[in-house]
Image (cartoon, rainbow, N blue to C red):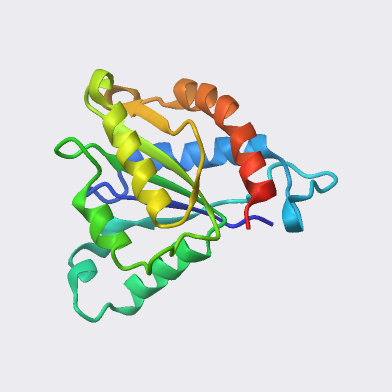
Amino acid sequence: MTRSTVLVADPEPRSAIRAAAQHASGALAGLVGPLGPGGARSAGGRGGTGPADVVDLAELGPALLAARPGRDVVDAVETVRRSDVLLVASPQAHGSYTGLLKVFLDRLPELGLGHGVAVPMAVVDDLRNGRTIEDDLRVLLADLGAWVVEPGLLLGRSELADPRGVVGAWAEVAAPALGRALAVRV
């Protein structure tokens, strides 16, 4: 079974971005198909990633800045590091991803995502200038060693109320790339 995690970097806890990210993770899981050890296809079943763990950074808040992290931060870092598939969702903040995400990912060692596949998800106010955040997320995740799936998911804030159509269309395109990445990752 493939381990999936949704990492939400919205400063608002239990946000609409979190709900959309969980929906996106589920849509991908439903399309990738069961993957056994080494990426081999298993017989039967639906979706190879199972329900995703969720790390909502807003719930960790100031604990992320503590010199000595508490158990909740340590557990969140380990959940992210152990993930085979990590969907990283961030709203656009000052042209890029949130500082909350950067502070959290700074706790990872170099190549701390080196065994997994990452899927960037960005939420923007204006889709016309949203490509920058998706590119920034892709670079950040690749620098941490993840195999980054293309295309990432780019949602307009206005689409958060009902993201199913956009997420479904995106998942149809992204699922084959995720399946290939899972099959060949180290």
Total number of numbered labels? 0
Q: Specify the quadrant of the image occupied by residue 75.
A: bottom left
**In front here: 107 or 57?**
107
Q: Residue at x 32, y 48 (%)?
A: 14
Q: Where 152 sits versus 162, above or below? A: below
The extreme bottom residue here reads: 68
Q: Where 126 sits versus 105, above or below? A: above
Question: How far across and down, in percent of the image, does residue 44 sit?
Answer: 83, 44
Question: How far across and down, in percent of the image, does residue 111 sit?
Answer: 43, 63
Q: Residue at x 81, y 48 (%)?
A: 42
- The answer to whether residue 159 is visible is yes
Quarter of the picture holding the N terminus: bottom right
Q: Is residue 111 left or right of residue 98?
A: right
Q: Where 153 sits versus 119, above or below? A: above
Q: Residue at x 58, y 51 (%)?
A: 51
The extreme left residue here reads: 94
Q: Residue at x 39, y 38 (%)?
A: 121
Question: How far across and down, in percent of the image, does residue 101 sit?
Answer: 28, 53
The extreme top residue here reads: 128
Q: Is residue 90 left or right of residue 117?
A: left
- The answer to whether residue 16 is visible is no
**In front here: 175 or 5?**
175
Q: Is residue 71 left or right of residue 47?
A: left
Quarter of the picture holding the C terminus: bottom right
